[in-house]
Amino acid sequence: MAELEIHPTSNIFPLMDNKEYETFKADIASIGLLQPICLHPDGRILDGRNRYKACLELGIEPRFETWNAQGSLVMFVISMNLHRRHLNSSQKAVIAMEIEPILAQEAKERQRQAGGDKKSETAKKERQTKATKSVKQKIAEPMPQARDQAAKIVGTNKQYVSDVKKIKETAPEKIADISSGEKTISQVKQEMKKEEKECKRQEAIEKGKLLTNDTVFVQSIEKLSLEKESVDLIITDPPYADKDVKTYEALAQVANECLKPGSFCCCYTGKLRLPDVLIAMTKHLQYVWCIAVFHPFSKEKHLGSPYQFAENWRPVLVFKKDGKPAICNFQQDVVRAERNKDFHDWQQDLQTPSQLIEAYTDPEGLVVDPFCGGGTTLVAAKRLGRRWLGFDASEESVALSKQRLYGTD
């Protein structure tokens, strides 16, 4: 039996995955081919690709019927497939994208045929001025936008169709994941956004490695040594894992050495090990206050068995070295943060360090961040006219901070 070609219109629907196909094939082997395979008048398969493939593999003689070539070809294929497929909205959007140009072409062809018999100038003027709701007038009216029509036909959101078209333009290899149902449009968009961000981040790292400076350095907290009583303020965001509690004590030791008397050390922390962090740091510094950084954008959930919480704020602990503060201005203890992760996965907002710097330092004061990450604290210090020093154990984080502080593009 000679193998038949597949009509391109049939390809608007995705093929079955392997598991689904094997189940379908076993069903045909058991009870035979119940529905004939539909052919285009030119002999190519319009509907029944999977049935035809299964028959060939099983050695079963397939039965055929020919499409009567009346009405819309694409509407016929959709009517034969859409309601017997379990497709999500994202998969339907891919189908809508595929049929959109076909629908547009069919509409143009109908308009061409409708106007073909009216060649005289008199007839044209008559059609343009006629005010009745005749069939001819309806044909002359603009067709609905092909995208909207395609979305309506398959039962999906027209914005999804626009989204999937953009995905095809920029990352065509990802369409297969949507078409198969492995990923939704939203998941692919998020994936692409992360990939774009990571690409920009890597470019910034490479540029940052080429910059020379005297304010940001690769150095771990354990080996950090600063001039005694030379620092006006420390703002930092150490790692939060259980094993990192000892890092907070190392931070407090460094702060006690390098801070001027009465100056402040402010650090972000997680909530789960908050008592341990307080114990570790109050061995060397005085606890003052806790500032709540509100994250209205947060969708994260922290599961601390047996309790479950949705996490919407982050503590910033305020400690002080013994002595009278030289500067301690009024500030609110709740900060509304804005999300920005362009330079670092754990990047914090710019509002919080800016508030702390204004509260605890004068212009030209020295601000230090021993875990500078993407350099947010250092950027805040630069914008407010303070001096700054940044340190991080990660060479990439230091490069990102340098590019953010000194990069020209």
Image: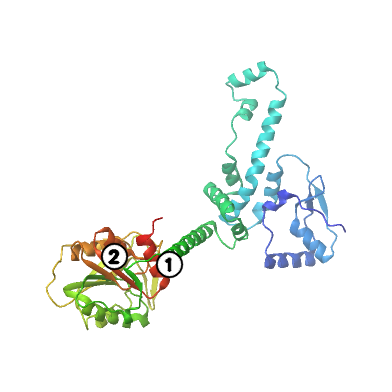
Report helix, strand or loop for mark 1: helix
Q: Quadrant of the C terminus?
A: bottom left
Residue 209 tag number? 1
Instruction: Give the Cα distance between marks 2 and 1.
Output: 32 Å
Q: Is residue 297 at least partly visible in the picture? A: no
Amino acid carrying label 1: it is Lys
Say left or right for 181 vs 240. Answer: right
- Coloring scheme used: rainbow
Where is 285 relative to 315, above or below?
Answer: below
Q: Position of residue 69 (x, y in %)?
A: 77, 41
Between disc 2 and disc 1, whose residue precedes?
Answer: 1
Residue 293 tag number? 2
Q: Quadrant of the N terminus?
A: bottom right
The quadrant where residue 177 appears: bottom right
- In front: label 2 or label 1: 1
Where is 392 relative to 210, above or below?
Answer: below
Q: Residue at x 26, y 82 (%)?
A: 280
Residue furthest to the right: 1
Report helix, strand or loop for mark 2: strand
Seen from the viewer's position, the closer of residues 296 and 255 is 255
Q: Is residue 406 at least partly visible in the picture? A: yes
Q: Residue at x 82, y 54 (%)?
A: 4
Amino acid carrying label 2: it is Val
Q: Residues within 10 Å of mark 1 (few under 14, many from 20)?
A: some
The quadrant where residue 259 appears: bottom left
Q: Residues within 10 Å of mark 2 (few under 14, many from 20)?
A: many
Q: Residue at x 71, y 30 (%)?
A: 113
Say left or right for 341 vs 26. Answer: left
